[in-house]
Image (tube, rainbow, N blue to C red):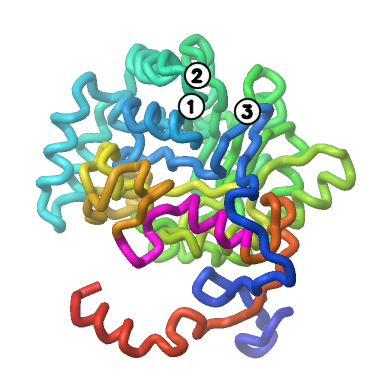
Amino acid sequence: MEVPIGKGRWARRAYGFEEISIVPGDVTVDPELVDVSLEIGGFKLEIPILAAAMDGVVDPNFAKVMGKLGGLAVLNLQGIQTRYENPQEVLEEIISAAPDKATEVMQRIYREPVKDELVYKRIKEIKEAGVITACSSVPQEAEKMAQIALEAGVDIFVVQSTVITERHKAKNYTPLSLEKFTKKIPVPVVVGNVVSFSTAMELFETGISGILVGVGPGGACTTRQVLGIGVPQVTAIADVAYARDVFYHKTGKYIPVIGDGGMNTGGDIAKAIACGADGVMLGQALARAEEAFGRGYHWGMAMSHSALPRGTRVYTGTTGTLKEILFGPAKTDDGTQNLVGALKNSLGVCGAMNIREFHQVELVIAPTIKTEGKVLQQAQRVGMGK
């Protein structure tokens, strides 16, 4: 429903994770019985969690661990892993840079060209570990990167930009046609990012195998401040999920929707999936893992942009192993560990046996759900600087 924001100007109300809550079901299920698996283009993930293609999170070692735990890590093909033979040396510069110099340092570091041989080497290393292998490229370089990635044995190819459409106009380069690209590439193609029903419908027609939802919600992203664009994740996911369902009823093809960004806790993940997502892509939540490349530091993908940076460097700290963050046992009480256990419990409390059933749960608008009756908790967390 649109509401007036001025004379002759209307806007649609949109919602974020903080503003809704999930209603328990009339039937409950033992969490051990629920299935939270995710299928993308014929590849089955035991858990519906993807690690974002962000340099502070994913390197080949992290990708191997994530894959063996049942998830999927996406390697950034325009990142420092493919620009430097020894990215650890570069990492030292990034994490030691003063806050007011971090963006300049990042811009200088990312001016180093991407090297084809490193693209091949990093993907091959992940593939040889026997896990599902995925990588991400910006649209402008997708065709070239895909050929190298295919030679190295990639299983899933992601085309990702701040906002992606099939009808992109450009002056200095030929825009990527996703319809032609998906026909040419013999592996599933996942694209992102989108926030609207109409854009998603057009992208589904191109032959993609998955879609990423979210513009600017990530903890290290500043797109919303810099460009003023974005839609809160609850509404964005629900709109794109509706497009998925319309497309499925029309064609019989089910294309998974993956909420990308804005989720830090098990509760956030549960809400994303309850709103219609089939899986989630996490950055900051996984940057806290001991195996994360950034050693407790996390930075936005567009932070290094030469003309208009749209990211920042944040310190997440290291709170546990990747296994603890995904499966526990949790050592924290804030919902940032045992994410899969929390999700399974949410499904169980709502009587859902799988993710598709969880899409049908009742939701309520509840902007005070996290603060109602929590005065002491809030005071203590403020006192501890949290």
Query: Magenta includes 182?
Result: no
Given the image, on which type of amino acid does mark 3 rest?
Phe
Q: Residues within 10 Å of mark 1 (few under 14, many from 20)?
A: few
Query: Residue at horizontal 14%, vertical 57%?
Result: 100
Asked whether the beta carbons under mark 1 and mark 2 sit within 8 Å of each other, the answer is yes
Instruction: Decide which of tag 3 and tag 1 comes sooner along the chain.
Output: 3
Q: Position of residue 247 (x, y in %)?
A: 82, 46
| Residue to which mark 2 is pinned | 144
| Residue to which mark 1 is pinned | 141
Query: Residue at horizontal 71%, vertical 80%?
Result: 2
Instruction: Estimate the spatial distance between the alpha carbons at disc 3 and disc 1, rounded to whole Å.
Output: 25 Å
In front here: 58 or 369? 369
Q: Is residue 50 left or right of residue 361?
A: left
- For label 3, the SS is strand
| Residue to which mark 3 is pinned | 43
Q: Is residue 191 left or right of residue 111?
A: right
Quadrant showing the N terminus: bottom right
Query: Residue at horizontal 47%, vertical 54%?
Result: 261
